[in-house]
Amino acid sequence: MVLGFEYKSSQIFAFFISLSLFPIVSLILSKSLSTFCIVLMPVAVSNPFAVQSYQVAIYSHAQDIPQFALDSLRYHPVKSNTILPLLEKRMNQPPSNNGGEVWVVVHTGLDVKFIASVTCGAMGNYPLFIFTPIPYSYLHPSAISSPVYLLAQTLLRSVHRSRIYSVFAPQVVAEVFAEVWSSLTNIGVVQKPYYHAMISYVTNETLTLRNISSIQGAHCELRPATLSDTNAVAELCFLFASDSEPFLLDREGAMYEARTLIQSGQCWVYTVTRPYEPTKIACLVAYTRNTNVAATITKVVTHHQFRSQGCAEKLVGRVCLHLLATKRYVSLFVGITNRAANVYRKVGFIGVGEGAQPVQDIDPYIELGFDRKYVQLGHW
Ligand SMILES: *[C@@H]1O[C@H](CO)[C@@H](O)[C@H](O)[C@H]1NC(C)=O
Ligand SMILES: *[C@@H]1O[C@H](CO)[C@@H](O)[C@H](O)[C@H]1NC(C)=O
């Protein structure tokens, strides 16, 4: 009933979190220096936030994340796609000077409420990502303000405020965090969201591959990109970024991204070769956040010249077929007003596209930025 569409972007800043609403809290420093505990007034209601206390811990090494937190992320392979893939990668790397990466876990006993990460990828620093295992309908601003406040406070002790250039999370969570963070740091929230999207996924059971004819009079291939495609892939990365304000790329950045994607084997292309013409790349699909169980499509770009010819549907479908041979889910985010949602829907992504019915866990996500005078923009 309370699906995210109730929170339209025009209303994002309509609600105002009064600090006086926060329950009276007492801060107890526990034995472990990294663990703080906030004790709240007991409330006897059966919802995930009607608890007596929240605990919080912050970790700077992936290897230290407790098992119950990992289990919670792994139990939700789609929702955790912004955090778990990199966390697992770091767990398999020797612990070293990690460039300031941290993870914050807010929990009650073994019950995870929120996990936040401050991490970086090949192209730069990531936003603050926040995961919650709790169904969206329970994420009411007044219910989550205390644990989110605790998260923000804990983060601010370890991370410089200039590092948090934006927050990307389920919409209500990001909105509450942005307000709280703004009040703690005196850094304003950028009014226009950087990104407003729905999460979705496809499985073997929902995958639909329509028989779309290839481009007429040309030899077409759907295949993993190779280094000989670097220039064309870079062109499409450049195009993609130019549409992703404020995360623009220059030509050099686009070349670097293209090489990184191709070398890591996380990029497929739809090539078109007409007689007597050099091969062109009509469409590109990249998937960069992957675990053994789930892959995440992070980029789909169709060259202007090849729009509206079914290229994206064909390539996304082909890539999902490839990924679903070994993984249970392929997830992605799609902009709330992006017509590509209809393409994904045709391929079998659930809960998105025209006329889609609400589906459990197909929730709205939002990225809210902080005043760029005081933060250093990253890239993702
Ligand atoms: C797909 O469509 C083409 C013509 O567009 C047809 O020749 C081919 O047999 C079809 N394949 C399948 C599996 O339906
Ligand atoms: C999905 O289906 C394919 C083909 O039917 C199969 O080989 C693959 O193992 C399935 N994937 C999973 C994760 O079950």
Image: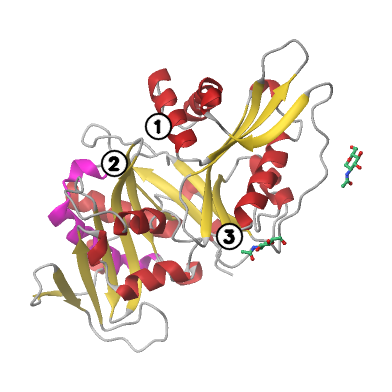
Q: How is the image coloured?
A: secondary structure
Q: Residues within 10 Å of mark 3 (few under 14, many from 20)?
A: many
Q: Which element type, helix, strand or loop, lies under badge 2? A: loop
Using the image as rendered, state which of residue 103 and residue 39 is in the foreground. Answer: 103
Q: Which element type, helix, strand or loop, lies under badge 1? A: loop
Can the viewer see residue 175 in this picture?
no
Using the image as rendered, state which of residue 375 and residue 42 is in the foreground. Answer: 375
Q: Is residue 22 left or right of residue 368?
A: left
Residue 300 x/y as whole percent? 58, 37
**Which residue is label 3 attached to?**
329
Magenta stretch, main secondary structure, is helix
Q: Is residue 108 found inside the magenta-colored segment of the image?
A: no
User: CB under 8 Å between callouts 3 and 1?
Assistant: no
Q: Is residue 138 left or right of residue 158?
A: right
Residue 163 x/y as whole percent? 22, 43
Residue 172 x/y as whole percent? 42, 59
Q: Residue at x 30, y 54 (%)?
A: 90
Tell me, for residue 247, which label it has, or none: 1
Residue type at mark 2: give it.
Tyr
Res. 218 image quadrant: top right
Q: Residues within 10 Å of mark 1 (few under 14, many from 20)?
A: some
Separation of residues labelled 2 and 3 (CA atoms): 30 Å
Question: Of tags 3 and 1, which is closer to the observer?
Answer: 3
**Which residue is label 2 attached to?**
165
Separation of residues labelled 1 and 2 (CA atoms): 11 Å
